[in-house]
Image: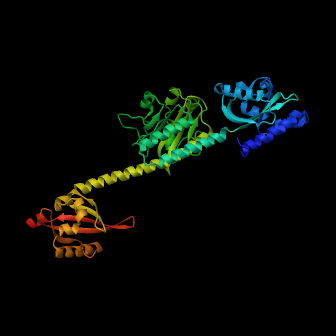
């Protein structure tokens, strides 16, 4: 780690001060004061790797008192999978004979007395006696658990935002996000519910068994295939999930943003069972072996469009920082879902409009001011005999009016109709097969994205003239 790194500089100065104090054997009161007041973790080992000092910062992070650890080697503080690496670091320091060598900096975890893991960055340095042999080791550390967690959360959020802004379909996006969040939070199962009719069924799940999904997917209790409804005509949603979606969960059970989480769902439901709750608690989660539950409403403005659910087998799995992070994710997902739904509605309307236009008896077309046809329905081809490609290649007026004088008059009338001077054009066109056909043409100018288009309707008048 280079000299320009601020954390290294801090370690270097601290270790140098400790070395000077310990090696001279003077100012023991100053050493004691430093160990007691410094915010860094300071642990000192003898030449056999046994703990001789363990300052209050170490006690706070580990949960062990100084008295409990003195005389022990520090392996018991480190998870089993990291103990070999820690032994190698200590062996390197104990075998070193260079007093002026740079501190050995590395990272490892401490497993605290209550089972929690903390990520620590260490700068370890040895102290030499008069014979040039290692007499002790000074280990100076910083707890970077929250810093690294925040870095990971920031990276996950950026990843999620990029996916939400991607052109992928809703199912693909939600599946990716759910797996990403579940993996980041180290949960055992997760699901996303979306509003469908009167209910909020699962649309994506990870880790849940098929039996759990079958029993828990629907939140309404259906009677004869019909869910009971509340006074406002909405389906009655059961359990805590339903209450979070409605936004009426007891304030003591939810955060200010409406998110619910618990470290032991069984203890909570047992407590709630003794109270008069306005909804039925199923607790399928607890029966399935999950203890920690987080339920995050997916909202856009005032509408709840879904629910993000995270389950873990262990107790107290979610921290306040985790819930704050999940709430931010919930808002982003809610906004994206609203966008997806608006896009789906737009596509649905467009599909209906396309069908109406294509199945219409009269001819419909939309053309630019330059004469390029963007919409040209089946009736247009049936009436004129010309395809959209033929009209765009050769031009409408040249095909429908091969006579130059008729073409000039048709262009003039079209301009008058577009300007609103006449209601429609009563004219005769020449079809592809050479026949002449009487038609009425209505031209309506349209402004779309600051560009003018002509929407035209052509009515075949042949049946009228024939009669």
User: Front-most of 231 and 383?
Assistant: 383
Query: Is any part of residue 234 visible from this angle?
Result: no
Q: Quadrant of the N terminus?
A: top right
455 is higher (above) or lower (below) than 163: below
User: Front-most of 382 and 431?
Assistant: 431
Q: Would you say 174 lies left or right of 357 here?
A: right
Q: Quadrant of the C terminus?
A: bottom left
User: Front-most of 115 and 38?
Assistant: 38
> In x, y percent, where is residue 305?
46, 45
Task: Residue lying at the far right in this picture: please name it.
Answer: 26
**Number of marks:** 0
207 is higher (above) or lower (below) than 157: above
Which residue occupies 64% across, 40% down? Answer: 148
How does the figure colour the protein chain or chains?
A: rainbow
Which residue occupies 21% across, 69% down? Answer: 397
> In x, y percent, where is residue 238?
47, 36
Quadrant of the image occupied by residue 170: top left
């Amino acid at each position: 780690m280079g000299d320009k790194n601020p954390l290294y500089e801090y370690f270097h100065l601290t270790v140098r001060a400790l070395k000077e104090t310990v090696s001279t054997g003077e100012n023991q009161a100053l050493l004691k004061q430093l160990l007691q007041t410094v915010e860094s973790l300071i642990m000192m080992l003898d030449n056999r790797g046994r703990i001789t000092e363990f300052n209050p910062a170490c006690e706070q992070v580990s949960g062990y008192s100084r008295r409990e650890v003195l005389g022990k080697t520090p392996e018991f503080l480190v998870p089993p999978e990291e103990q070999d690496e820690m032994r190698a670091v200590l062996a390197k320091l104990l075998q070193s004979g260079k007093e002026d060598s740079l501190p050995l900096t590395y990272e490892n975890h401490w497993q605290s007395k209550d089972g929690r893991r903390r990520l620590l960055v260490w700068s370890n340095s040895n102290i030499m006696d008069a014979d040039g042999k290692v007499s002790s080791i000074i280990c100076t550390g910083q707890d970077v658990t929250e810093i690294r967690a925040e870095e990971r959360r920031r990276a996950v959020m950026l990843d999620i935002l990029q996916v939400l802004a991607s052109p992928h379909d809703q199912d693909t996006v939600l599946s990716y996000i759910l797996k990403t969040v579940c993996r980041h939070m180290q949960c055992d199962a997760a699901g996303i519910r979306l509003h469908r009719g009167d209910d909020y069924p699962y649309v994506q799940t990870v880790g849940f068994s098929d039996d759990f999904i079958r029993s828990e997917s629907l939140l309404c209790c259906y009677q004869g295939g019909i869910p009971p409804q509340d006074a406002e005509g909405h389906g009655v949603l059961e359990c805590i999930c339903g209450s979070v979606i409605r936004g009426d969960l007891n304030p003591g059970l939810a955060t200010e943003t409406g998110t619910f989480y618990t470290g032991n769902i069984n203890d909570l439901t047992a407590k709630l069972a003794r109270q008069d709750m306005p909804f039925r608690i199923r607790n399928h989660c607890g029966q399935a072996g999950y203890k920690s539950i987080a339920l995050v409403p997916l909202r856009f403005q005032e509408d709840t469009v879904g629910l993000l659910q995270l389950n873990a087998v262990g107790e107290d799995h979610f921290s306040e920082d985790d819930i704050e992070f999940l709430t931010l994710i919930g808002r982003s997902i809610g906004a994206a879902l609203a966008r997806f739904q608006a896009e789906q509605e737009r596509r649905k309307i467009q599909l209906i409009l396309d069908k109406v236009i294509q199945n219409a008896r009269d001819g419909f077309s939309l053309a630019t001011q330059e004469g390029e046809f963007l919409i040209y329905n089946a009736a247009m081809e049936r009436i004129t005999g010309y395809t959209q490609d033929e009209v765009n290649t050769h031009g409408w007026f040249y095909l429908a009016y091969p006579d130059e004088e008729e073409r000039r008059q048709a262009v003039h009338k079209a301009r008058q109709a577009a300007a609103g001077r006449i209601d429609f054009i009563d004219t005769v066109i020449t079809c592809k097969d050479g026949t002449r056909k009487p038609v009425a043409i209505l031209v309506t100018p349209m402004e779309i994205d600051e560009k003018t288009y002509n929407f035209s309707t052509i009515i075949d008048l042949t049946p009228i003239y024939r009669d």
